[in-house]
Every structure is written in structure tokens, then in C-alpha cells.
Image (cartoon, rainbow, N blue to C red):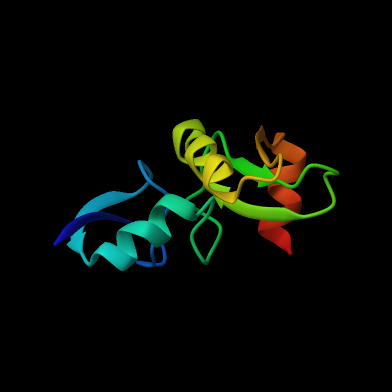
């Protein structure tokens, strides 16, 4: 069992450190680590990170911590890098 985060509003998976902690599967914990918002949008991270490809034309993944994004960028390789999303960028991704 792993620690997961649950939104207080929709009871769906929430980003790491948001909502309340519960026990879940490793797969659910991984989903929480990659989320920037719950399904209803009420629980969102203050600092969302993305991993971008070198020409900045593709988001390779979304992460709630810099450490997770940096580790993912190293795994993706090919000059990918961690990038902190602005509030406006984060809101546009949540709305999409």
C-alpha cells in the first residue's frame, strides 16, 4: 500500500500534498505525483512542473514537484528539461 491524496470536494485523486492522505495502490500514488489538479479542479498544486522536449513543442509529463520533474527529465533524456508552469499556464492546462 502507498499513500495517496484525495480531493475533499470530489473525492478523486489529488496532487501530492493536496487534500487528505489515504492508503492506495502504487499506481494511484504515481497518478497523484503526476497530477496538477483533481478532476473537479478544486484541489490543485501551487507549483506545477512540466517536462518539455528541447524545442519546447511538446509536454512530456506533468509533475507536482521539481524533484519529480527533474527525475523524469533525466529519464526522458534527449535534452528534455523541467519547467515551472506559471499560474496562467497551469490554469490553461486544467481547463483543457
Can you say whether 85 is above or below 19 in the image?
above
Q: Position of residue 50 (x, y in %)?
A: 64, 44
Whether residue 10 is visible here, answered yes or no, is yes
The residue most toward the left is: 1
71 vs 16, nearest the viewer: 71
Q: Quadrant of the N terminus?
A: bottom left
12 vs 56, nearest the viewer: 56
Q: Position of residue 80 (x, y in %)?
A: 68, 42
Q: Position of residue 4 (x, y in %)?
A: 27, 56
16 vs 68, nearest the viewer: 68
Snapshot quadrant of residue 30? bottom left
Whether residue 7 is visible here, answered yes or no, is no
Q: Position of residue 45 (x, y in %)?
A: 51, 41
Q: Residue at 51% x, 54% y: name it.
A: 42
Q: Residue at 41% x, 61% y: name it.
A: 31
Q: Residue at 58% x, 40% y: name it.
A: 48
Left or right side of 68 for 4: left
Snapshot quadrant of residue 14? bottom left
Q: Residue at 78% x, 55% y: name it.
A: 58
Left or right side of 85 for 56: right
The residue most toward the front is: 78
Left or right side of 23 for 39: right
Amino acid at each position: 500500500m502507498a499513500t495517496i491524496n484525495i480531493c475533499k470536494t470530489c473525492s478523486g485523486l489529488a496532487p501530492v500534498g493536496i487534500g487528505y492522505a489515504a492508503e492506495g495502490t502504487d499506481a494511484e500514488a504515481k497518478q497523484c505525483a503526476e497530477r496538477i489538479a483533481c478532476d473537479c479542479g478544486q484541489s490543485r498544486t501551487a507549483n506545477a512542473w512540466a517536462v518539455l522536449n528541447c524545442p519546447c513543442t511538446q509536454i512530456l509529463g506533468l509533475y507536482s514537484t521539481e524533484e519529480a520533474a527533474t527525475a523524469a527529465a533525466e529519464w526522458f533524456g534527449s535534452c528534455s528539461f523541467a519547467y515551472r508552469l506559471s499560474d496562467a499556464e497551469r490554469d490553461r492546462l486544467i481547463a483543457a
